[in-house]
Image: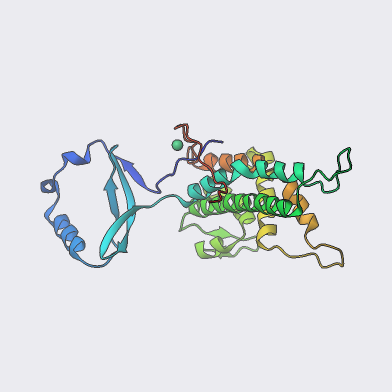
C-alpha cells in the first residue's frame, strides 16, 4: 500500500478564487467581528475559523496561541492520520520478522562444528524491533477504526437496547467497538458492512481482539518457564497485511475515498536509524 493522503475534517470547494474578493465585499458587522477577534489576545471557539487554500478550497481549522500569536491549524481527520501511521509502520514489519526468524536459530552449527549463528543480543534487538513495529501497527489501525466509527454516529442519535431503554450519544460512545460495528453503525447509516463483506468483517474483529490483548496484556499465571510465549507466537503469526485492507475498505465503504493512497511516487515509512 502506498502512503496515505491526509484529509481535513471540513472544507468547501468554492467557485471563486479567494484572491478575487476584497475586504469591501464583506458585510459591516462581519468586518467588526473579524477586527475585534483579530485584535484580542485570546482564542474564542464560538467562531468558525476557515482559511482559503490555493486550489479554491475553504478549509476549517482552529487557533493555537503561540508566543502571543494566533496560529491557524487546519483540523485533520484523526482516523486518517492513525491509518497513515499504521501504513507507515507496516513497511518494515515483515523485514524485521524475516531477520528474526532467519537468524535466531541458536543451535545450528556448520560442518566444522562451529556455531554459525548470531549472538543472542542481536536476536533480542531483532525481536524488540519486530514487536515494536507490529504492536504499533495494530494499535494505530484500531485507533483509526475507533476514531472513524465514533465520528460516524450523529450527536443526536439514540440507541434502544434489548431491554428497551433509550440511550444517548454519551452512553453510545462509551460502549465497546463491537457493539458500534455490529449494531450502531448499521442502524444509523442504514448500511451494514458485516453483512455485505462478512469475511473482511471477521478480519476486523481479529484486529480488535488482538488490539485488546496488546492493550490489556497480562502474563500467564500457571507455573511455566515463560509468561508470554503463546502471545508472542501469535504476534509472529498474525496476518498483518490482510488487516490494513479490511480496515481501509470498511472506512471507504462508509465514507467513499476517505482513505486515499498517494500517487506522488515517494515511499514514506517508519524505520529505525542509528546515528
Ligand atoms: Zn505522496
Comparing 163 with 11, the one in front is 11
Is 238 left, or right, of 64 in this rendering?
A: right
Q: Extreme front residue here?
A: 112
User: According to the image, what is the colour scheme of the structure?
Assistant: rainbow
Place of residue 256 in the rendered image (x, y in percent of width and height, measured from the top left): 49, 38
| 156 or 141, nearer to the observer | 141
- What residue appears at the point 29 percent right and 42 percent down from the top-left corner? 53
Counting the numbered discs, the total is: 0
| Residue drawn 13% across the image and 46% down it | 25
The quadrant of the picture showing ligand 1 is top left
Residue under the image location 17 percent in, 55 percent down: 30
Left or right: 87 with respect to 118?
Answer: left
Toward the viewer: 242 or 88?
A: 88
Report x, y in % for residue 19: 19, 40
> Which quarter of the image is occupied by the N terminus?
top right
Q: In this view of the protein, can residue 152 be seen by the observer?
A: yes
- Percent x, y of residue 212: 67, 58
Q: Is residue 121 above or below residue 57?
A: below
- Res 201 visible: no
Towards the viewer: 144 or 118: 118
Amino acid at each position: 500500500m502506498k502512503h496515505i493522503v491526509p484529509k481535513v475534517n471540513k472544507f468547501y470547494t468554492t467557485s471563486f478564487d479567494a484572491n478575487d474578493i476584497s475586504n469591501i465585499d464583506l458585510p459591516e458587522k462581519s468586518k467588526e467581528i473579524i477586527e475585534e477577534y483579530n485584535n484580542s489576545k485570546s482564542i474564542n471557539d464560538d467562531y468558525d475559523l476557515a482559511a482559503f487554500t490555493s486550489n479554491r478550497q475553504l478549509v476549517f481549522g482552529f487557533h493555537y496561541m503561540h508566543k502571543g500569536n494566533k496560529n491557524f491549524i487546519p483540523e485533520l481527520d484523526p482516523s486518517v492520520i492513525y491509518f497513515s501511521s499504521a501504513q507507515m509502520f507496516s513497511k518494515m514489519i515483515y523485514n524485521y520478522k524475516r531477520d528474526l526468524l532467519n537468524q535466531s536459530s541458536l543451535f545450528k552449527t556448520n560442518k566444522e562444528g562451529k556455531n554459525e549463528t548470531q549472538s543472542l543480543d542481536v536476536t533480542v534487538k531483532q525481536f524488540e524491533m519486530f514487536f515494536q513495529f507490529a504492536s504499533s501497527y495494530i494499535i494505530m489501525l484500531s485507533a483509526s477504526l475507533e476514531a472513524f466509527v465514533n465520528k460516524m454516529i450523529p450527536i443526536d442519535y439514540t440507541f434502544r437496547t434489548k431491554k428497551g431503554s433509550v440511550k444517548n450519544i454519551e452512553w453510545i460512545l462509551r460502549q465497546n467497538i463491537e457493539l458500534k460495528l455490529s449494531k450502531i453503525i448499521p442502524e444509523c447509516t442504514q448500511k451494514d458492512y458485516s453483512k455485505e463483506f462478512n469475511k473482511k468483517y471477521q478480519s476486523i474483529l481479529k484486529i480488535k481482539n488482538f488490539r485488546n490483548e496488546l492493550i490489556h496484556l497480562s502474563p500467564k499465571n500457571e507455573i511455566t518457564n515463560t509468561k508470554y510465549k503463546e502471545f508472542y507466537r501469535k504476534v509472529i503469526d498474525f496476518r498483518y497485511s490482510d488487516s490494513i485492507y479490511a480496515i481501509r475498505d470498511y472506512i471507504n465503504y462508509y465514507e467513499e475515498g476517505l482513505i486515499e493512497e498517494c500517487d506522488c511516487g515517494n515511499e514514506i515509512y517508519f524505520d529505525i536509524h542509528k546515528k
